Image (cartoon, grey):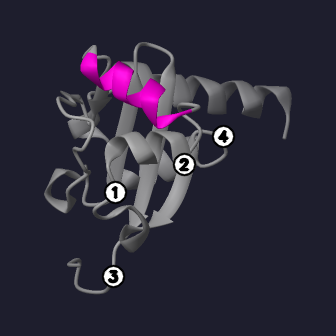
Amino acid sequence: MTPDDALQRTLGSSQLLYRTPPDQLKSDQVLSHLSHEPFFHRVKWSDIRGVPITKLMVSYGLCKSRAEASRLVSSRAVLVNGKIVADPRDEVKMSELVDGCLAVVKVGKKGHLVLYADLPAGGTA
């Protein structure tokens, strides 16, 4: 990869994370711009379905402990797809996935977790 390619990839990543409203993200853009990032995880829907957001935050490296994640949720610092998470037991729901497969978790301005959920055939679980 040339330095120019790396710069374009970084600019594209920044554009998606900081300037595009979560509800306007498209899965193909996310895959092409963010799949190389350490905060991007392609997962099976069955692996995240029914799992509290605080557990996901720890499992995918956004926080070091569930207690830390719960404190962040309690202080209203956690957003999933642009919506504030109100309860540490909240889960990502299939109906809330952007473009049918994306969950973008943000903590403050710098913490990001992008989950690209591969759904079962038929899109239901």
Check disc 3 and report the residue beneath it: 120
The one nearer the camera, 26 or 64, is: 64
Above or below 47: residue 91: above
Q: Which mark is residue 51?
A: 1
The one nearer the camera, 9 or 34, is: 34
Tell me whether the residue at label 1 lies in contact with that at label 2, contact meaning CB atoms closer than 8 angstroms: yes
Check disc 4 and report the residue beneath it: 38
In magenta segment, residue 7: no
Tell me whether the residue at label 2 lies in contact with that at label 3, contact meaning CB atoms closer than 8 angstroms: no
In magenta segment, residue 70: yes
- Taking the spot 20% from the left edge, 61% from the top edge, the residue there is 94
Q: Secondary structure at mark 2?
A: helix
Residue 118 % position (x, y): 41, 70
Above or below 7: residue 36: below
Mark 1 and mark 4 lie on one chain; the one further toward the N terminus is 4
Q: CA distance from mark 3 to mark 4?
A: 25 Å
- Taking the spot 44% from the left edge, 47% from the top edge, the residue there is 56
Residue 64 % position (x, y): 59, 31
Q: Amino acid at mark 1?
A: Val
Check disc 2 and report the residue beneath it: 59
| Majority secondary structure of magenta residues | helix
